[in-house]
Image (spheres, grey):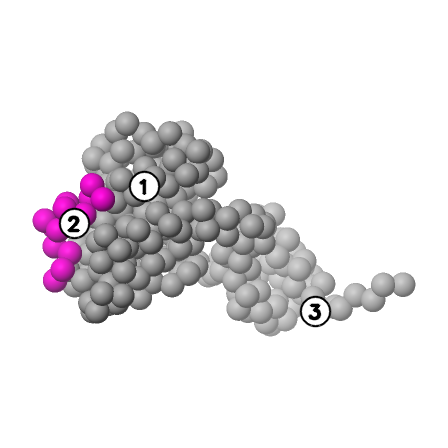
């Protein structure tokens, strides 16, 4: 008879419950699993440590980035490997940090990050790292591009879960203002962030069409405002758009003629 490790069995049972219905509270999960809350909390903490679940600003549990990596097997790795040359070439061209991110749950998850700034001896304001999660998608150029490109129902679900925490002078903290801003992003084909996520930081992002409604991608250049003011961001934009088009060709997707490929 195969032996079952009780704690592992319980933890995986909780993971299935979170997968079954995202956004359940600790109390709900404990009741559904037939466990006391303290035991449930310890098991969820273990799952969180490994990135399999996450807790939103309301204290509700959702699937984490680790599940994506398990669920998609090598797909994300293959995408990062497939597009690495294009992203690295852009980082060398602009001499700044470049990130390729995807929309997962309500966060922008960085699947490929190349630091072109420190390689040229420039100061790095915000360090990028693989699989960083930016939950304040209302405040970053990447986040806003991902929301603008995502199917409307998915974008609305993300907006409904945002914490609206003001992290910098120009953070958008109103859902109606964000929706109006996203419409502008769709029309112009790119998003910028200046004093929105972090004071003194700026960035510009464009969408990368993947050919898959479930895979929403964006490419961004970001760094200190002292180097990336509004004028410099617009100078970088054609290089960013060209790199995004190269990524789309590598993915086998025809680039959109207006610079934005909105998935409906």
Residue drawn at 23 percent across, 49 percent down: 204
Residue drawn at 17 percent across, 54 percent down: 194
The residue to which callout 1 is attached is 244
72 relative to 187, above or below: below
Residue 59's spot in the image, x, y percent? 46, 61
Main SS, magenta residues: helix
Tag nearer the camera, 1 or 3:
1
- Quick one: 230 or 122, which is closer to the camera? 122
Residue 174's spot in the image, x, y percent? 25, 48
Comes first in the chain, label 1 or label 3: 3
Q: Which residue is most to the left?
A: 231
- Quick one: 27 or 215, which is closer to the camera? 215
Quarter of the image that includes the N terminus: bottom right
Residue 156's spot in the image, x, y percent? 38, 40
Q: SS at mark 2?
A: helix
The Cα–Cα distance between marks 1 and 3, rounded to whole angstroms, is: 45 Å
Residue drawn at 25 percent across, 45 percent down: 240
User: Residue 234 in magenta?
Assistant: yes
Asked whether the beta carbons under mark 1 and mark 2 sit within 8 Å of each other, the answer is no
Tag nearer the camera, 3 or 2:
2
Comes first in the chain, label 3 or label 2: 3
Q: Relative to residue 137, is residue 74 drawn left or right?
A: right
Location of residue 24 by image quarter: bottom right
The residue to which callout 2 is attached is 233
Query: How crowded is the residue under tag 3: few (<14 C-alpha within 10 Å), some, or many (20+)?
Result: few
The Cα–Cα distance between marks 1 and 2, rounded to whole angstroms, is: 15 Å
Q: Relative to residue 202, is residue 50 drawn left or right?
A: right
The range drawn in magenta is 226-239
| Residue 248 appears in the figure | yes
The residue to which callout 3 is attached is 7
């Amino acid at each position: 008879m195969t032996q079952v490790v009780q704690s592992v069995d319980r933890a995986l049972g909780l993971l299935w419950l979170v997968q079954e219905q995202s956004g359940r509270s600790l109390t709900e999960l404990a009741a559904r699993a037939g466990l006391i809350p303290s035991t449930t909390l310890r098991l969820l903490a273990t799952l969180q440590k490994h990135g399999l679940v996450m807790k939103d600003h309301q204290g509700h549990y959702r699937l984490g980035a680790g599940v994506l990596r398990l669920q998609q097997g090598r797909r994300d790795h293959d995408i990062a490997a497939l597009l690495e040359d294009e992203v690295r070439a852009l980082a060398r061209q602009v001499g700044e940090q470049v990130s390729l991110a995807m929309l997962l749950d309500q966060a922008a998850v960085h699947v490929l990050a190349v630091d072109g700034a420190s390689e040229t001896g420039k100061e790095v304001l915000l360090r990028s790292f693989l699989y960083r999660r930016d939950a304040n998608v209302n405040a970053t150029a990447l986040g806003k591009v991902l929301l603008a490109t995502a199917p409307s129902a998915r974008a609305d679900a993300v907006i409904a879960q945002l914490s609206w925490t003001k992290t910098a002078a120009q953070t958008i903290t109103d859902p109606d203002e964000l929706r109006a801003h996203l419409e502008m992003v769709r029309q112009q084909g790119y998003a910028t962030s200046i004093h929105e996520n972090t004071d003194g930081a700026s960035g510009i992002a464009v969408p990368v069409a993947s050919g898959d409604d479930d895979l929403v991608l964006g490419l961004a250049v970001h760094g200190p405002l002292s180097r990336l003011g509004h004028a410099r961001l617009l100078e970088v934009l054609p290089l960013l758009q060209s790199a995004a088009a190269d990524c789309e060709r590598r993915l086998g997707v025809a680039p959109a003629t207006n610079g934005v490929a909105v998935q409906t």
